[in-house]
Image (cartoon, rainbow, N blue to C red):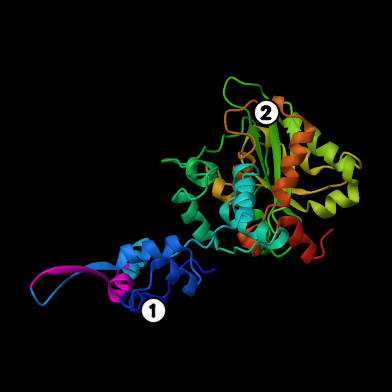
Amino acid sequence: MGKHITEIERYKIETMLKDGIKPCDIAVRLGKHFTTIYKEIEKGTVELLNSDLTYRKEYCADAAQRITNERKANKGRDLKVGNDYAFVKRVEYLIGELHYSPYAAVQDIRKNKPCKTDVCKTTLYSYIDKGIFLNISNKNLYSKSKQKNEYDKVERPSLKKLKSKTIEDRPKDIYNRDEYGHWEMDTVYSGKNKSKSCLLVLTERCTRDEYLLLMPDRTLESTIKTINNLEKTLGYEVFSNRFKTITCDNGSEFGDSSGIETSCIYPDKQRTQVYFCHPYSSFERGSNENANKLIRHWIPKGEDISKYDDEYIQFIQDWINNYPRELFSGLSSNEYKASLKIS
């Protein structure tokens, strides 16, 4: 039986009450629960003036309809989420446990676990801001919980910078991001007075493909050794084809471009080309900086990176590469690479 009273049913109620029909019988005739009818009568009962200037109480369909319309207007639009508990549970899991943004959560649900509810990212942001969800809030949104009033860290000058190529020497077509194989490189390090351990972060400019590699410290020796290990794992041909160029900042851990560029398998061959950003210009590695923010979902700033093992770092790398991106219309880096037929 229907729960809500329609405007036509209100006029029927008014007529039946004037005919002396009891509310319980009205409920049976309209297929409603008797409490629904009693509440409706209570809502629409008004005082009317008699001809002898006395007052009587009587149900008025027009008054009941007016009150209903006013309540609907004050209530605003119904939430799209309704009673779709599967949607609520999935959103709380993706944002609360997997640290997805609202956009990424919407894309994941549309691709992997379609629900009755389908909202845009703006609506989902609004629901979270209004406290619609029980287990997540704005505190779970990294972009809001980590807002700052000043710029992020500045680049550290190299302690012994050898003659090297700057970003101005880099081929101009790299700016178009049309070709796979051009990377940005940075380090994410432990908090002050913690260990020297850090992550070497490589971000591909076209697809935002990501490599995260643990290093014992932020030294040039460790950087070259880590990249050597990566070349040995991939092989010279794969490495040189995959890492055509690398753009990094002026940190001391990147101070010798020749050591990074030279193959450890074939010392007489060049495996990549390294270019350096201008000092204090982290925006020239914008993709890299955005990737570092994603890493901080799982390794908060100030943490000791030495307590995380290779398996956990691999999990973060996989999470980033499978993260739905608005830039790619909801595709992840892995999916976007597949669409470009990049292995």
Q: Could you tell me the amino acid type at mark 1?
A: Lys
**Residue denoted by label 1:** 12
- Based on the picture, tell me whether residue 289 belongs to the magenta stretch: no
Q: Nearer the viewer, residue 305 or 30?
A: 30
- Which mark, residue 305? 2
Q: Could you tell me the amino acid type at mark 2?
A: Ile
Q: Is residue 124 above or below residue 164?
A: below
Q: Secondary structure at mark 1?
A: helix
Residue at (63, 28) in percent of width and height: 190
Residue at (57, 28) in percent of width and height: 302
Q: On the picture, is 84 further left or further right than 114? A: left
Residue at (89, 41) in percent of width and height: 233
Q: Which residues are magenta?
A: 53-67
Residue at (78, 53) in percent of width and height: 244
Give residue 194's position: percent from left, percent from top.
62, 21
User: Is residue 267 in sight in this rendering?
Assistant: no
Q: Residues within 10 Å of mark 1 (few under 14, many from 20)?
A: some
